[in-house]
Image (cartoon, helix red, strand yellow):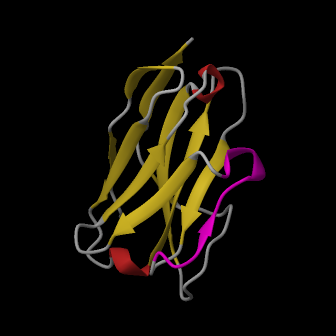
C-alpha cells in the first residue's frame, strides 16, 4: 500500500504562486507514474499534471499549460506541483496520485493510490 501525503496548500491572492509537495512511502517510488488532480466544489475531479518515472515525460491539460509545472525528486520520494499566476478558479482540493508502471510513461487516468488532498484557495 502506497501512502501519499500532500502539503503546501493554503490561501493565496490571485496572481500569486504556491508549490505543493507530495511525499510517498513507497521505496520503489521511481517506478511509479505520479500525478496531481484537483476537485472544486460541485465539479468533477480533473487531472492537473502527470509525470513519468524519470521526469522526462510530463502531461498537462491544454488549459493549464504554462502556469503549472510538475516535477519529482526520486531521491526524496517526492513530487511537486509549482503553480504560478493563480486564479480564483484554481481554488480546489488538490490530490496527489500514483500508479505503478512498467514503462517510463505518463497517463491521464487509472491511478490506484491517492493522498488525502490539500486545500488551495485563491482569493480575488
Give the tally of numbered discs: 0
From the top left corner, tell me how far across and down residue 67 is, in percent: 59, 45
105 shown above or below 116? below
Q: Is residue 4 visible?
A: no
Q: Quadrant of the N terminus?
A: bottom left
Q: Is residue 123 inside the magenta stretch?
A: no
Q: Is residue 62 left or right of residue 109?
A: right
From the top left corner, tell me how far across and down residue 29 is, in percent: 34, 74
Q: Is residue 50 visible?
A: yes
123 shown above or below 57? above
Q: Toward which corner of the image does residue 108 lie, by quadrant?
A: bottom right
- What residue occupies the far top of the structure in this picture? 124
Q: Quadrant of the C terminus?
A: top right
From the top left corner, tell me how far across and down residue 110 is, in percent: 65, 64
Q: Which residues are magenta?
A: 55-65
Query: Observer-nearest residue: 9 or 118?
Result: 9
- What residue occupies the far bottom of the structure in this picture? 102
Q: Residue at x 56, y 24 (%)?
A: 91
Q: Is residue 59 inside the magenta stretch?
A: yes
- What residue occupies the far right of the structure in this picture? 62
Q: Residue at x 65, y 49 (%)?
A: 47
Query: Observer-nearest residue: 62 or 44?
Result: 62
Q: Residue at x 68, y 61 (%)?
A: 109
From the top left corner, tell me how far across and down residue 83 is, in percent: 49, 42
31 shown above or below 77? below
Q: Residue at x 59, y 55 (%)?
A: 49
Amino acid at each position: 500500500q502506497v501512502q501519499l501525503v500532500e502539503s503546501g496548500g493554503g490561501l493565496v491572492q490571485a496572481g500569486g504562486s504556491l508549490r505543493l509537495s507530495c511525499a510517498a512511502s513507497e521505496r520503489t517510488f521511481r517506478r511509479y507514474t505520479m500525478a496531481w488532480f484537483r476537485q472544486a466544489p460541485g465539479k468533477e475531479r480533473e487531472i492537473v499534471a502527470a509525470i513519468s518515472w524519470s521526469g522526462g515525460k510530463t502531461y498537462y491539460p491544454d488549459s493549464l499549460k504554462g502556469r503549472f509545472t510538475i516535477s519529482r525528486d526520486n531521491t526524496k520520494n517526492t513530487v511537486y506541483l509549482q503553480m504560478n499566476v493563480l486564479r480564483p478558479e484554481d481554488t480546489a482540493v488538490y490530490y496527489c496520485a500514483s500508479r505503478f508502471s512498467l514503462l517510463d510513461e505518463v497517463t491521464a487516468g487509472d491511478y490506484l493510490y491517492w493522498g488525502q488532498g490539500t486545500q488551495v484557495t485563491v482569493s480575488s
